[in-house]
Image (tube, rainbow, N blue to C red):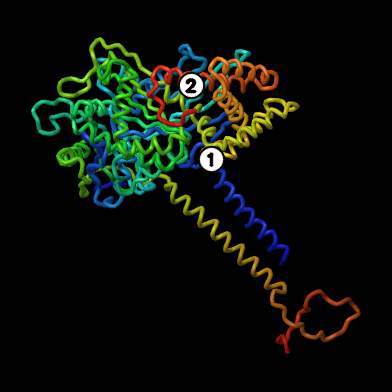
Amino acid sequence: MTATHAWPAAVAAGRRRDYSTVLAPDILTDGYGVLVEALSPGPVGGPPRMRTLGGGRLTVAYVTHALTTADLGEATGRPLRDEQSRPLLMMYGLVRTGTTTTPPRRSDLDGAKRVALAAYRHFLAGEEAFRALSSRAVPVDWPGGGAEPPPAKDRRVRRAGVVAAALVVAVALIGWFFLRSGGNPRPCAPPAVVAASPAPASCPPTTGPPGR
Amino acid sequence: MNLIVLPLLLVVVAAVVVLVRRRRLAPNPAAAPPRGDDGVPTFRVVTLGPRGSGKTLLLASMYHQMQTWGGRGYFLAAPREQVALLNHWFTEVEDPGRDWPAGTATADTREFAFDVRTRGRSGALHTVLKLVYLDYAGTLLTQPPEPGSTLWKDLDDRIESADALVAVIDGHRVRQWIDGKREGQMRLQHALTAMISRMLVVEKPVTFVITKWDLLRDVDVDEDSRLRTVRKLLMSNQGFRDLVQEHSGRRVVRLVPVSAVGPAFAELDESGAMTKLPDGLLEPTYVDVPIAAVVPDVFEQIMLRLDQAKLAAEFERLRRQTRRPPGEAFADLGATLIRSTNRVIGALNPLYSSLVGLAAADLMRRQEQTAAAHEANVTRLLDDAESHIEEFQLAQRKVIREFRSRVDVLEGRLSSSRLGGTP
């Protein structure tokens, strides 16, 4: 299975503000905080890292980029630093539905970088009041996504279902057992023949309508 | 028919029981790690501090200094992957040709578990205490949570369950404030407010740590005067003042200056940026004190919270119990103290009762005796207990005494470092 659409995303540190979501898929408008909690910096320029989000509903592939003044449009590429003189890093990448361990193509990640850097410039311009910008899905060629095991949350739900079904069956069986063996006793029909044997513990079988 | 239904019922009930038990036994990654592994007390430390205040660097420097004996009777050990990470951070700092390490990302929130190890009389190594130290991104403290994130709540829970708190005050901001830069003052006030609002609601021992102490080296003539100046500055913050004044009778509050790199390693350039000196000398200062203060402070706080009459009665009972082995008597005393101070140390494992009893006896004598007489008493106490208390407990006690001694040395040198909870 190949994803045909994915959303650019980015988490980065500012000069004053700590790591924040800078760019988030429009499908995560109400929950984009999962990105900042999932994207941990890797080696700068290293291979894409993969993380699943939302219990396996989404996959994000991202790389770590050391920000420079060139990213802000300046000719020189001096490292950008925060107030404590530490280098500023940005994690940018693509988010898609489903799970996969295959990273997207480099060209698609480069496309995401352009969108992420544009968002980062907005972030730097007003860090204090900044709120993550929304990204729209873009066409990508990102294979994988069909062969992963069901996410943990689904397994939990399935297990809870089995327990609930077992309980229902148990309650039904218990109820049936007690009702059936005298929970609502009905008067026995008078025996047609008095035998010399001891009285039966339960009603003998009858063929006519009961309770007459 | 009954012969079929009953086994069926049994099978269903057994299946439910097995499923429920499996669920209960399965490890829950969100739950806090268990305390008192194998009876070794675990003390949890949460360091509060805004972004860039130096929390991670303090941790790396502290571990670097305490991972070997270094003239102490104990050292810290950590899992291999954590050792690698801490040493990597320290190497980044140490190398004048490399950048400072980047800030901690929110996703990198993690706990470091340190074993405090020492040698017993037989020469065997013992893990006598465990310290769990939380490292996290400062954003969790000072910025509003992003939609859908859960770590903010997680941090609050960890603060609630911590045994001691370390509040990090950025020495760079203090320097800016002293230099009359409004931004430094504002940032520091904001950070103090965020930290104190959380600290006011939990009654744990608090160590305020002033990081980047090297940036303040020219503020006053000597170190104690310097610390007094900073203390005065901090006391002008209402929240800080309230915390110290309101809680000084019932909780231990300290002010410890530290420098992860020392006075001759880095300096502020004309743009205000922190730059490493090409031939800088790395000499961390006091970085071991905050962690050394945790355990004695927890015990001291127990004593501060106790009804003194009740405590005296407990000790009288202890004295009368001459027929009982000291180890057993101390365990009994400790159990009583844990019960009495449940609100303060509610999470402290009852397994630690012997340790608490011994520490209480030490602290009680400290209050009664001069330092020299105290030492003699402790020695006598140890001698009495020696034949009954196992090697492990003696080793444990030796380490706690060393922790205590490290804090005493700092207090002797910098009298302004004690803010509250006078013993």
Amino acid type at image mark 2: Ala
Q: Name the residue that disc number 1 marks.
A: B346
Check the residue under mark 2 and report the chain it is in: B
Instruction: Give the residue at x 29% y 45%.
Output: B144
Q: Are marks 1 and 2 in contact (CB under 8 Å)?
A: no
Taking A182 as reference, is B334 left or right?
Answer: left
SS for dot 2: strand
Query: What is the chain letter for disc 1?
Result: B
Q: Nearer the viewer, residue B379 or A164?
A: B379
Q: Residue at x 19, y 30 (%)?
A: A67
* Most foreground residue, B358 or B274: B358
Most extreme residue toward the bottom is A212
Nearest to the eye among marks 1 and 2: give it. Answer: 1
Tag on residue B77? 2
Q: Position of residue B105 (x, y in %)?
A: 31, 34
Mark 2 Cα shell of 10 Å, populated few (<14), some (14-19), many (≥20) = some
Disc 1 marks which amino acid? Gly
- Percent coordinates x, y for residue B300 in the rendering: 51, 30
Q: Quadrant of residue B52?
A: top left
Q: CA distance from mark 1 to mark 2?
A: 27 Å
Asked whether residue A111 is in view, the answer is no
Q: State whether residue B348 appears in this view.
A: yes
Q: Is B270 left, or right, of B108 in this rendering?
A: left
B263 is higher (above) or lower (below) than B86 = above
* Residue B178 vs residue A6, the one in the foreground: B178
Residue B45 relative to residue A179: left or right: left
Give the answer, above or below, for where B266 lies relative to B21: above
Tell me where residue A77 appears, x and y as whole percent.
Answer: 13, 26
